Image (tube, rainbow, N blue to C red):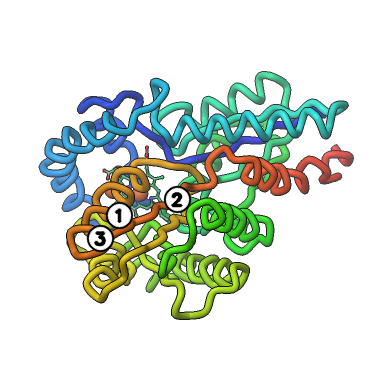
Amino acid sequence: MKSGIIFVNLGTPAAPNTSGVRQFLKQFLSDRRVVEVPRLLWLCILYGIILPFRSPRVAKAYQQIWMNDTSPLRYFSQRLVDGVASQVAERYPNQEIELRLAMSYGSVSISDTVDELLAAGCERLFFLPLFPQYSATTTAAVHDEISRVFSRRRDIPQWSWLRNYHNHPGYIEALAESVQQYWDENGRGERLLLSFHGIPKRNVDLGDPYQRHCEETAQALATKLGLGDEEWQLSYQSRLGKAEWLQPYTDKTVIGLATSGVKKLDVLCPAFAVECLETIEEIDGEVHEYFTENGGEEFRYIPCLNDSEVHQNLMFLLSRSFIEEKTHLFS
Ligand SMILES: C=CC1=C(C)c2cc3[nH]c(cc4nc(cc5[nH]c(cc1n2)c(C)c5CCC(=O)O)C(CCC(=O)O)=C4C)c(C)c3C=C
Ligand SMILES: [Fe+2]
Ligand SMILES: [Fe+2]
């Protein structure tokens, strides 16, 4: 029986220009899972302020980081999936398994990817959102889209998904290995800052487990690296709008560390499977500058897992339970 594995990332503009970014932001920020502000008020803010003013500014930022004719997010995600596909082909030579990358927003959509795999004869599908920590803003949005796609079909295939892997030993090990390798090559900073993408605090108050997942990832990684409480810190980045988001904020934390005399700071962004605008431009750009402007000397950004071998191995490991699952034998 032919199977399909669909890795899902957030999405990225089709082109690094104002119209490409506008189209991407429009789709992304219209999703009720992402923004829970009352609809009419939000549409006024989105169409009156965010789309006209933010799109050209963000387009410039994407131009700075665009690589190999695409965004780093798509580039590294695709290379990661290609690497896992090679491993799967090698380890399961007698099984027909197709691997694809799809995006929650922009192309290639989850809907087109499912259509393609079903047309190719896949009878079971596995979705693996590249969000280690569950949040309704990202993971549930993927689930909504999967449900929407199947709601239009009469014959729904056997399908499953991986909801989260924030404390999977393989994920913690992969992060620890990546940090340790960075330290082996560059020495250690005075402090390790673990900066996660933020969400509004209200979402957590209403039951989103994201903050707990981030804390569990951070604690497990610190334990794996043998770090004492004074040697690491957790913070939340990428706040948008005026409402309170999860605290402490990354920018304020970094300024605080610099002004309190930390000269050499290591920074890792564990919520991002691969490099993107929020890591390259925001963390290694803006936040990096805040550190040096306030007395810090070395801001050392540790890259995401990207398309590294440890990351490919982790994704292979996370896919294996689906590949070897026996439920399809009953159909
Ligand atoms: C409005 C609120 C936003 C929430 C909530 C949010 C949650 C969230 N996002 C990611 C991962 C990524 N976000 C990225 C870009 C991005 N995010 C928001 C807003 C929210 N994100 C915006 C407006 C943008 C676009 C850039 C900008 O205008 O600043 C990206 C990068 C995409 C790329 O192509 O590089 C990622 C990845 C997570 C994990 C998350 C909640 C847990
Ligand atoms: Fe985001
Ligand atoms: Fe941002």
Q: Is mark 2 within 8 Å of ligand 1?
A: yes
Disc on res. 103: none
Image quadrant assignment for residue 312: top right
- Under circle 3, the secondary element is helix
Residue bearing mark 3:
291
Could you tell me residue 103's position as x and y percent? 47, 35
Could you tell me residue 242's position as x and y percent? 17, 61
Q: Amino acid at mark 2?
A: Thr
Q: Nearer the viewer, residue 224 or 147?
A: 224
Residue at the spot 27% in from the left edge and 55% down from the top edge: 287
Could you tell me residue 31's position as x and y percent? 35, 45
Q: Amino acid at mark 3?
A: Phe
Q: Is residue 193 left or right of residue 128?
A: left
Against 205, is 139 above or below?
above
- Under circle 2, the secondary element is helix
Q: Amino acid at mark 1?
A: Ser
Q: Is mark 3 within 8 Å of ligand 3?
A: no
Against 184, is 192 above or below?
below
| Labels in figure, total | 3
Residue at the spot 11% in from the left edge and 42% down from the top edge: 48
Residue bearing mark 1:
238
Q: Nearer the viewer, residue 79 or 289?
A: 289
Q: CA distance from mark 3 to mark 2?
A: 29 Å
Residue bearing mark 2:
138
- Under circle 1, the secondary element is loop
Q: CA distance from mark 1 to mark 3?
A: 16 Å
Residue at the spot 19% in from the left edge and 64% down from the top edge: 294
Q: Badge 1: few (under 14), some or many (20 or more) residues near its Cα, within 10 Å?
A: some
Position of the C terminus by quadrant: top right
Q: Nearer the viewer, mark 3 or mark 2?
A: 3
Is residue 143 among what the camera can see? no
Q: Nearer the viewer, mark 2 or mark 1?
A: 1
